[in-house]
Amino acid sequence: MGEERALIRYDWTLEEIEAIYTSPLPELIFRAQQVHRRFHRADEVQGCALLSIKTGGCPEDCAYCPQSAHYRTGIVRTELLSVEEVVAAARRARAQGATRFCMGAAWREVPSGPTFARVLEMVRRVRALGLEVCCTLGMLTEEQARALAAAGLTAYNHNLDTSPEYYGRIITTRTYRDRLATLERVRRAGIRVCCGGIIGMGESRWDRYRLLEQLATQRPHPESVPINLLVRVVGTPLADAPPVDVFELVRMIATARILMPASMVRLSAGRLSLSDEAQALCLLAGANSIFIGERLLTTPNSPPDRDRALLARLGMRLRDLASRDGDGIS
Ligand code: SAM
Ligand code: DTB
Ligand code: SF4
């Protein structure tokens, strides 16, 4: 990979990002394909499964999120699941073809004490099934990051979501700087970073370039970059956000692929609202991972039968457990 490593850049400018994002679609997809094939297999996607280990009642006010206590979305709050419940879900996910298991908790920050000890045990037990393990638990202290690393955590998900300038329109209970500080702690603990964003929140193209700039100038790049299409949930302030043109999603994915060649670019939330053809275009644009399974965290996902049929029609497959470890170099 030495030669490939030399192709990875961290000095992308906003102008370059804009030029890539706005290039004619055939050019953009061609370039993304060239990068994709150099760093990844073009016929394989990684299947990841999500599990909400603690649902609802979150003190943050993220305008997109059904789990925020600030909005009435009908979400039923739950306590932290038991280790056995989580392990059973991870086994089911593995049987369905997932090689990465992501646990999400509706916390502003990770609590300490027995609650955190239980999360660490979940990480150890799921890792022992041979799965990559990702957690998204809100803000972390340095000590907690080190403990997660010691438990064998593969990656920590903490999204920047949008540009620094638009962030305050979406979330007021924390700052972009808070987010970057947690990401820094994750990095320092030696955990891989999973960091991406959401499109369709009323942001401009410029906000998307700024988000991509934030991600692609990190050294190393986040090994995992989830691109979520807003799932509009009734009761949240973004319930009636105008739907985004699907080609914007394709452009976002292709640009992320070109800027961060070795990273996994994940076509994350929102697939249920996409046609098969739109999803195929996202995969052609360089996405190489999807969430599989009935549910995301609290909302329905694209049904497993439909996903299996789609991959079969495209002549593609889910990456198996024996394959090279998930995240690429970066
Ligand atoms: N509380 C933790 C946090 O915010 O980091 C972890 C869970 S949170 C649900 C994880 C990510 O899911 C958010 O950063 C956001 O990018 C994404 N997300 C949440 N609700 C979404 C929605 N309705 N549509 C698309 N993405 C969403
Ligand atoms: C990410 O970027 N997307 C996932 C995962 N990281 C944790 C979450 C999507 C949540 C969609 C809304 C829901 O189901 O609650
Ligand atoms: Fe809480 Fe995370 Fe939802 Fe924001 S995105 S309200 S922090 S669960």
Image: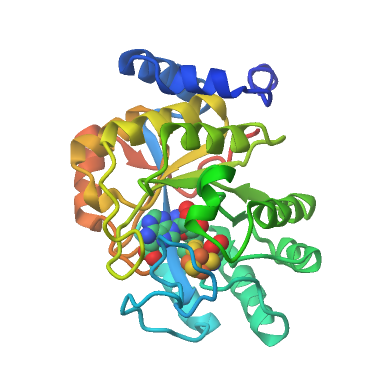
Residue toward you, 45 or 250: 250
Depth check: 21 or 203 in front?
203
Name the image quarter holding residue 285: top left
Question: Can you say which quadrant of the picture contains the C terminus?
Answer: top right
Residue 238 appears left or right of 138: left
- Expressed as whole percent of the image width and height from the top left, the position of residue 241 reads 30, 52
Instruction: Name the side, left or right, on which 135 lies relative to 299.
Output: right
The relative height of residue 65 versus residue 74 in the rendered view (above or below) is above
Question: Residue 2 or 105: which is nearer the viewer?
Answer: 105
Q: Where residue 233 sits in the image (x, y, percent)?
A: 30, 64
* Residue shown at 33% from the left, 40% from the top: 317
- Residue in view at x 36 percent, y 20 percent: 29
Quadrant of the rendered structure where residue 33 is? Answer: top left
Residue 118: x and y in percent read: 63, 81
Let me know if residue 66 appears in the view: yes
Q: Examine the image and state in which quarter residue 27 appears.
A: top left
x and y percentages locating residue 214 in the rendered image: 62, 37
Say if 185 sits above or below 67 in the image: above
Picture quarter with the N terminus: top right
From this viewpoint, is residue 98 visible?
no
Up/down of 160 relative to 314, above or below: below
- What residue is rendered at 51% in x and 42% in y? 323
